[in-house]
Image (cartoon, rainbow, N blue to C red):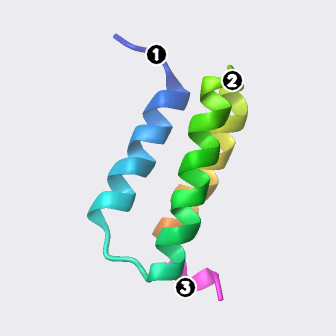
Amino acid sequence: MPDDLAADTIRKLEETLASRSLPEHTKELLGVSLSQARTAKAAGHDQEAITIAAQALHTAENPSTEQ
């Protein structure tokens, strides 16, 4: 079983971004976060990738907190 929390968190962010109907500005912010998380993961900074993706997921789940 793969035990790659960074990849799993990034995948969840990708799925959330693809499946949710979110305001355009929120989608843009999530897209930037996704790119940053992928870059951090590729550079071997798994904890940073997890943090970025988790914060973006929180934003996706609570878009009204961002105004």
- What element does badge 1 sit on? loop
Q: Is residue 62 visible?
A: no
The residue range painted magenta reads 63-67
User: Residue 39: x and y, percent?
Assistant: 63, 35
Q: Which residue is mark 2?
A: 43
Question: Looking at the rendering, in which quadrant would you find the N terminus?
Answer: top left
Which residue is situated farthest in the left direction here?
19
Q: Which mark is residue 3?
A: 1
The secondary structure that dominates the magenta segment is: helix
Residue 16 in magenta? no
Q: Nearer the viewer, mark 2 or mark 3?
A: 2
Nearer the N terminus, badge 2 or badge 3? 2
Nearer the N terminus, badge 3 or badge 1? 1
Q: Which residue is mark 3?
A: 64
Question: Looking at the rendering, in which quadrant would you find the C terminus?
Answer: bottom right
Residue at left 70%, top 30%?
Answer: 47
- Quarter of the image for residue 32 reads bottom right
* Amino acid type at image mark 2: Ala
Q: Is residue 20 visible?
A: yes
Query: In the rendered view, does 57 fall on the left or right side of 40?
Result: left
User: Residue 9: x and y, percent?
Assistant: 49, 39
Residue 66 in magenta? yes
Q: Is residue 40 above or below residue 23?
A: above
Nearer the N terminus, badge 1 or badge 2? 1
